[in-house]
């Protein structure tokens, strides 16, 4: 089952990894064709990974199409390390390093050291805010603050 939002397409995945590598990794039936279920799961997982980092800082309007180029790039980076983790012999890159690089880019985005050009970040609820812990006994007794 695919999610409502998929930030990248099979064609973009093939552009990043090459059609040959995608077929080698995701031909689960050994029939020479990419498994639609497996590639949908990859794209869903990569999308979920990126959105889990991005949505606390940006509104859901970032998932309106067309998707911001930076969202697509970050998702394709996630696709690449997930594919490398599944079959490192075909991707021939260290998936842990790729994941670390992707994670750092997402941390930078979330901390607003970088941005999605098409959408300014929403200020986080705690940025510049003040949290006050009031005495619950004071409220229970009806006292003034």
Image: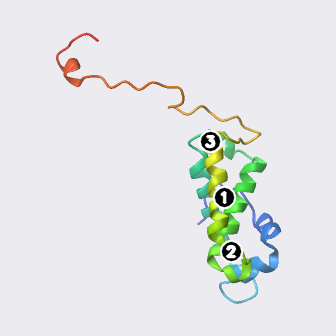
Say whether disc 3 or disc 2 marks the residue closer to the N-terminus. 2
Say whether disc 2 or disc 1 marks the residue closer to the N-terminus. 2
Residue 26 x, y percent position in the rendering: 69, 79
Q: Look at the numbered disc 1 and give the secondary structure of its residue.
A: helix
Q: Which residue is mark 2?
A: 36
Task: Name the residue rendered at 67%, 59% in the picture.
Answer: 101
Please report contact status of discs 3 and 2: CB closer than 8 Å, yes or no.
Answer: no
Q: How many marks?
A: 3
Residue 102 shows which numbered tag?
Answer: 1
Task: Say left or right for 72 vs 44.
Answer: right
In the rendered view, would you say 139 is above or below 28?
Answer: above
Q: Nearer the viewer, residue 78 or 33?
A: 78
Q: Nearer the viewer, residue 143 or 22?
A: 143
Residue 64 x, y percent position in the rendering: 71, 44
Residue 60 shows which numbered tag?
Answer: 3
Q: Please indicate, yes or no, whether residue 90 appears anywhere in the rendered image.
A: yes
Please report contact status of discs 1 and 3: CB closer than 8 Å, yes or no.
Answer: no
Which of the two marks, 3 or 2, is nearer to us in this view? Answer: 3
Residue 142 x, y percent position in the rendering: 20, 13
Q: CA distance from mark 3 to mark 2?
A: 27 Å
Q: Nearer the viewer, residue 35 or 76?
A: 76
Residue 47: which quarter of the image? bottom right
Task: Name the residue rendered at 61%, 41% in the picture.
Answer: 111
Residue 121 shows which numbered tag?
Answer: none
- The crowding category of the residue bearing disc 1, from other C-alpha atoms within 10 Å (few below 14, some 14 to 19, many at least 20), is many
Which of the two marks, 1 or 3, is nearer to us in this view? Answer: 1
Residue 126 x, y percent position in the rendering: 50, 31
Q: Nearer the viewer, residue 44 or 86?
A: 86
């Amino acid at each position: 089952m695919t999610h409502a939002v998929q930030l990248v397409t099979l064609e973009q995945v093939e552009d990043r990894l090459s059609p040959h590598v995608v077929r080698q990794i995701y031909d689960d039936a050994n029939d020479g064709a990419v498994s639609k279920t497996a590639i949908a799961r990859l794209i869903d997982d990569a999308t979920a990974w990126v959105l889990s980092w991005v949505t606390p800082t940006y509104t859901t309007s970032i998932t309106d199409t067309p998707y911001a180029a930076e969202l697509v790039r970050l998702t394709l980076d996630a696709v690449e390390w997930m594919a490398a983790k599944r079959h490192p012999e075909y991707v021939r890159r260290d998936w842990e390093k790729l994941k670390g690089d992707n994670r750092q880019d997402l941390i930078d985005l979330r901390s607003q050291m970088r941005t999605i050009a098409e959408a300014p970040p929403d200020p986080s609820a705690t940025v510049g805010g003040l949290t006050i812990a009031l005495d619950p006994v004071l409220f229970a007794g009806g006292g003034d603050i």
